[in-house]
Amino acid sequence: MRKEEYLQKLDQLLYDIPSEDRYEAIQFYSDYLEDAGDQVEEVIRSLGTPEELAKSIQKDLYGNNEAGDYTRVYKDVPGTYRVFFSTGGKFTGERCEDNSRYGSNTKRGKESYEAGRKGKLTPGQWIIFLILCLCAAPVIVPICGAFLSIILAIVVVLVAIAFGAGIAGIALVIAAIAVIVVAIVKVIISPLSSAIMLGGGLLMIGLGLIGIAFTAWIVCKVLPKLFVGLVNLCSGIIHKK
Amino acid sequence: MVFNTGATLLDAIVLAVVSRDINGTYGYKITQEVREVIDISESTLYPVLRRLQKDECLEVYDMEFGGRNRRYYKLTEKGRVQLNLYEAEWQVYSSKISSMFNNRGC
């Protein structure tokens, strides 16, 4: 992901914190990525997705840090104690026993667990959600229908163009071969018209190959991209919910 | 590293790193220098710097660099006092632990 894209996404994800805090955070990470220079891609990778970073910023700024244990990624070794110095001079410890998370961090595990819980709707929320869906149906169904029709139309048109161009290309190549064969046969009887036919035949082969290449381009490049785009769009809509 | 670094120790390390540049230093450099000593993720330092700033241990200023404003962090007087305290505490703590290991039974 590019730097600007990353920061923009982060900015959007921090919409619910005070604008001053958001500005500060964006300013910091904008500086940070600028200063990373050549390493920027690596830095972005280790910062995690914008979603993860946004979550950690929110948690760090407004979370409960009384135990002095706020987000830090230290490698937990099974069988060791995690020791924190709290600001009050108290001591807190937590035993790490989970071998499966070796090398990762207990805190983050908890976080994603909580996030998973937050993502699930309670029965009350489900009912409200269903009612909202029913109310919105008269508007949403036609819009979705229209949208799908447009996409389908685009796909059909593309396929038709590809098919037409392909068939025309193949036909041209076959005709060209016939013309060239005739030209070769006629070469002794009338060399002049034979040369013209040969030239015409070669031209037809060229045009036919262009048609076939165009078909191949649509089938191999354009259609897959269209499908990937569609799938991304759909998953984007679903994940936003 | 099997030992975890707690919030206070991280504060102390960050203050020490910032104190090395009299005229102040910037977020990326601080992070990389802290990472030379302890294993923290890239995203750990922002909240720490921000809290130290709120606690008035660090002050910030923006300075033009390469056509943009870069934020610099600088130790305040309060930060210096805090760092001295941490250092003294650390000396006591680490020497106790070291002597414990030096006098172990096996």
Image (spheres, rainbow, N blue to C red):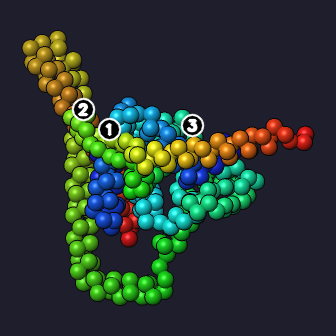
Q: Residues within 10 Å of mark 2 (few under 14, many from 20)?
A: few
Indicate the chain on which mark 1 is placed.
A
Q: Amino acid at mark 2?
A: Gly
**Residue visible at 21% across and 64% down?**
A150
Mark sitting on residue A34: 1
Chain letter behind tag 3: B
The residue where tag 3 is placed is B37
- Residue B104 position, x and y percent, is 86, 41
Residue B33 relative to residue B104: left or right: left
Residue ID at (26%, 77%): A140
Could you say where residue A48 lies in the image, as x and y percent from the top left? Answer: 46, 50
- Between the C-alphas of marks 1 and 2, the distance is 10 Å
Asked whether residue B66 appears in the rendered view, the answer is yes
A179 left or right, relative to B25: left
Q: Are marks 1 and 2 in contact (CB under 8 Å)?
A: yes
Instruction: Report the Cα–Cα distance between label 3 and label 2.
Output: 29 Å
Mark 3–mark 1 Cα distance, whole angstroms, equals: 23 Å
Task: Tell me the residue that label 2 is attached to.
Answer: B66
Mark found first going from the N terminus, 3 or 2: 3
Q: Quadrant of the N terminus of chain B?
A: top right
Find numbered disc 1 in the image and state the secondary structure of the residue it sits on. helix
Furthest residue in direction right, as rendered: B106
Q: Is residue A107 above or below residue A138?
A: above
What amino acid is labelled 3 in the image?
Val
Up the image or down, B10 lies above or below A54; here it is above
Observer-nearest residue: B34 or A211? B34
Nearer the camera: disc 3 or disc 1: 3
Q: Position of residue B50 (x, y in %)?
A: 40, 53
Residue B90 percent coordinates (x, y): 62, 44
